[in-house]
Image (cartoon, grey):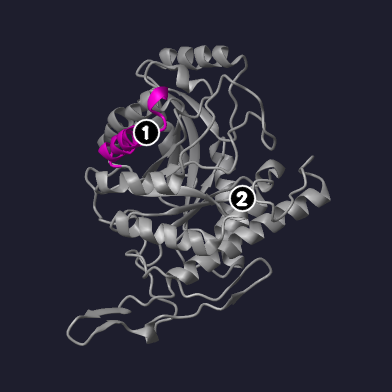
């Protein structure tokens, strides 16, 4: 696919994680840490994102407590630990929203694709066509120990050949996971349910299909127990930082999140994903590439910088991220997004440093600025997440032509 011209409307999403992406965010006045495990807290955040007409929100999740270490648990007491289940949270929030997409995170490494297919299909029904899926791997030994079905050796260095083999295998498994999920979504044809009380026929069994998937990681017969979702195929998304995960995005996703730190790097990443997309035989299929950015937003850039410094002081070290960290005003961020969009990016997933502060700054300050520039919607133009992303509803692979 060709890069987006600078004049193309931008897609915009927000990644929600606890009280925010900065580890000291829970100590800010706007953070509401006592409400973190309530439905109302999450409903308010997603409602704020919908107020800003955002395409979707992602909800972070994991299979172990959050940690300041990449692969190991820690024993810190001064940072948020613990989560609600992302899929269940999305299902709770869905009836309270009308337009915005809901994309919970699922760890494919230890979660059966049959369970995920019906969970996301159910979310699509509950939200009337606004569900998505963010697929993720786990290479943490402590998380594997929760399940007792496999062991994951501790990764020591990413340039080690054994580590590369392990990581490649985990991402290959995630690609198979997505393939099984997609086939299960298609295992019911759209008109499989007849519901004719007069004749006593509720279902047409000829329109339910075995998927008969046999791979190295999964063997799944099907069909699903949940009828085909309203969108047919809820969008699948994934975060990627290097060639192996770029390959997962190219093979299996509708939206990929990447972490460039400048426009040149963004251009190179987009080009690599397009090459992998062609190699996967998907050159003709739409695939959006979003850049992730952590944001500290204040009208006065000096206030944003001071807030970041204050939070860093509370933690005792400078906050670093896989994504570029932006500190400044909504106007300055709008400039940066338009500059980045010229690299072929379709949109952005913003990570609010403090959800209670930076999310309203996105919805109430950044969005109006982008609207004034003519690069962001002024009203929701579709009723489904696929529609908001400009993705057609796909035909069922098992239905007769």
Which residue in the structure is indicated by mark 1?
38
Which residue in the structure is indicated by mark 2?
137
Q: Position of residue 177 (x, y in %)?
A: 57, 62
Q: Position of residue 269 (x, y in %)?
A: 58, 48
Task: Report the quarter where the C terminus lies.
Answer: bottom left
Examine the structure image and report whether residue 26 is included in the region drawn in magenta: no
**2 or 1: mark nearer the eye:** 1
Real-space Cα separation, disc 2 to disc 1, in angstroms: 27 Å
Secondary structure character of the magenta stretch overall: helix
Residue closer to the observer: 105 or 147? 147
**In the image: residue 382, left or right of residue 119:** left
Within 10 Å of disc 1 (Cα), the crowding (few <14, some 14-19, many 20+) is few
Examine the structure image and report whether residue 37 is included in the region drawn in magenta: yes
Mark 2 and mark 1 in contact? Answer it, CB < 8 Å.
no
The relative height of residue 28 versus residue 365 in the rendered view (above or below) is: above
Task: Give SS at disc 1.
Answer: loop
Residue 199 in sight here: yes
**Sequence-wise, which precedes: disc 2 or disc 1?**
1
| Among the 4 quarters of the image, the one containing residue 312 | top right
| Among the 4 quarters of the image, the one containing residue 225 | bottom left
Q: Which residue is at 33% across, 31% downward? A: 366
Q: Position of residue 143 (x, y in %)?
A: 65, 44
Magenta segment, which residues?
Answer: 33-53
**In the image: residue 315, left or right of residue 305:** right
């Amino acid at each position: 696919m060709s890069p987006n011209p600078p004049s193309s409307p931008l897609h915009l999403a927000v990644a929600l994680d606890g009280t925010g992406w900065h580890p000291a965010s829970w100590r800010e006045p706007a953070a509401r840490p006592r409400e973190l495990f309530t439905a109302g807290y999450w409903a308010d955040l997603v409602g704020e994102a919908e107020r800003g007409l955002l395409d979707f929100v992602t909800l972070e999740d994991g299979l172990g407590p959050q940690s300041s270490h990449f692969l190991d648990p820690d024993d810190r007491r001064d940072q948020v630990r613990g989560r609600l289940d992302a899929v269940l949270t999305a299902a709770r929030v869905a009836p309270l929203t009308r337009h915005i997409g809901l994309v919970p995170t699922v760890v494919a490494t230890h979660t059966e694709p049959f369970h995920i297919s019906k969970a996301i299909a159910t979310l699509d029904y509950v939200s009337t066509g606004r569900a998505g899926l963010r697929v993720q791997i786990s290479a943490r030994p402590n998380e594997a120990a929760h399940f007792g079905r496999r062991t994951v050796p501790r990764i020591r260095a990413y340039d080690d050949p054994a580590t590369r083999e392990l990581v490649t295998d985990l991402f290959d498994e995630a690609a198979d996971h997505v393939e099984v999920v997609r086939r299960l979504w298609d295992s019911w044809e759209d008109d499989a349910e007849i519901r004719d009380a007069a004749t006593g026929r509720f279902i047409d069994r000829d329109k339910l299909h075995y998927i008969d998937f046999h791979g190295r990681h999964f063997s799944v017969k099907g069909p699903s127990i949940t009828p085909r979702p309203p969108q047919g195929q809820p969008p699948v998304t994934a975060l990627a930082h290097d060639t192996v995960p770029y390959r997962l995005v190219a093979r299996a996703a509708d939206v990929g999140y990447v972490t460039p730190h400048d426009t040149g790097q963004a251009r190179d990443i987009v080009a690599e994903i397009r090459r992998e997309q062609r190699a996967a035989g998907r050159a003709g299929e739409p695939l959006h590439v979003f850049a992730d950015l952590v944001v500290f937003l204040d009208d006065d850039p000096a206030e944003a910088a001071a807030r970041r410094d204050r939070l860093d002081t509370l933690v005792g070290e400078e906050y670093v991220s896989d994504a570029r960290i932006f500190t400044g005003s909504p106007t300055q961020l709008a400039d940066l997004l338009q500059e980045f969009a010229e690299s072929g990016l379709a949109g952005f997933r913003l990570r609010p440093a403090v959800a209670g502060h930076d999310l309203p700054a996105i919805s109430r300050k950044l969005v109006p600025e982008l609207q004034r520039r003519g690069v962001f919607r002024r009203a929701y133009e579709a009723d489904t997440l696929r529609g908001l992303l400009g993705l057609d509803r796909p035909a069922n692979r098992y239905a007769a032509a």
